[in-house]
Image (spheres, rainbow, N blue to C red):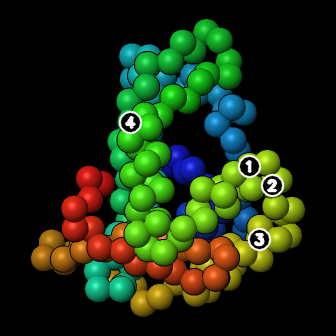
Amino acid sequence: MTFFSPLDAMIEAAYLANPPTEFFQHIFFDHFDPRIFANDHQGDIRLMLNIGYAASDHRIVVRKDKLVPIAEILTLKPDISRLPIALEIEDSTYKNYLDTRKRAGLFACEETLAMMVKQPWKDDALHKEVAWAIASIPEQVTYSDGLDINQVAMYDPEYKQWHFVSLDNEET
């Protein structure tokens, strides 16, 4: 799974620890050696770019004890002979990510992301925020075939709460 936000990456990793007793480290894409993945797919790198998490009527959907991502699937054909590789994401993909957050009321999300990259949070602050995000996950519902997944859920570090936005008219 690939994330625009380091905080979202850490929330995912902590949730997968179940219970989140051990913290994982995120790495920026330019520090990642993708050759192992490219070798498995004839030179292609397939990424799931996280937009948020599936939700049904303000309940976060889980399947096999994992959050269910709402994601865009990308296939890259990078030149893996030169590292780091460039991660080129279409403007429409990034715009969809930002628009989803803005529709949820997260109007400063672009500035927050830029700040996280320019001035990464210290580990203890990041771990506290992740712990709060995990502890404050709203009611959950287990995925089933008839479940109406009608929302995207995302965590807001500024207000320390989860937001939900309708999937209507979404391309994710």
Q: CA distance from mark 4 to mark 2?
A: 26 Å
The quadrant in which the C terminus is found is bottom left
Q: CA distance from mark 2 to mark 3?
A: 12 Å
Q: On residue 117, which mark appears? A: 1
Residue at the left extreme of this rendering:
146
| Marked residue nearer the N-terminal end (2 or 3) | 2
Q: Which one is in front in this view, the residue at disc 4 or the one at disc 2?
A: 2
Instruction: Name the kind of residue labelled 1 in the image.
Output: Val
| Marked residue nearer the N-terminal end (4 or 2) | 4
Q: Secondary structure at mark 4?
A: strand
Q: Is the Cβ of the residue at disc 4 closer than 8 Å to that at disc 2?
A: no
Above or below, 39 against 172 in this view is: above
Where does the image place residue 160, in percent across and percent down from the top left? Answer: 64, 82
Q: Which one is in front in this view, the residue at disc 1 or the one at disc 4?
A: 1
User: Which residue is at 61% across, 9% downward?
Assistant: 81
Residue at the bottom extreme of this rendering:
139
Where does the image place residue 140, in percent across and percent down from the top left? Answer: 39, 85
On screen, residue 123 versus residue 88, left or right, reads right
Q: Which residue is mark 3?
A: 127
Q: Which residue is mark 4?
A: 74
Q: In terms of depth relative to the viewer, which is nearer, 126 or 119?
A: 119
Q: In terms of depth relative to the viewer, which is nearer, 66 or 78?
A: 78
On screen, residue 39 versus residue 172, left or right, reads right
User: Which residue is at 57% across, 83% downward?
Assistant: 161
Q: CA distance from mark 3 to mark 4?
A: 29 Å
Q: CA distance from mark 2 to mark 1?
A: 6 Å
Q: Residues within 10 Å of mark 2 (few under 14, many from 20)?
A: some
Q: Secondary structure at mark 3?
A: helix
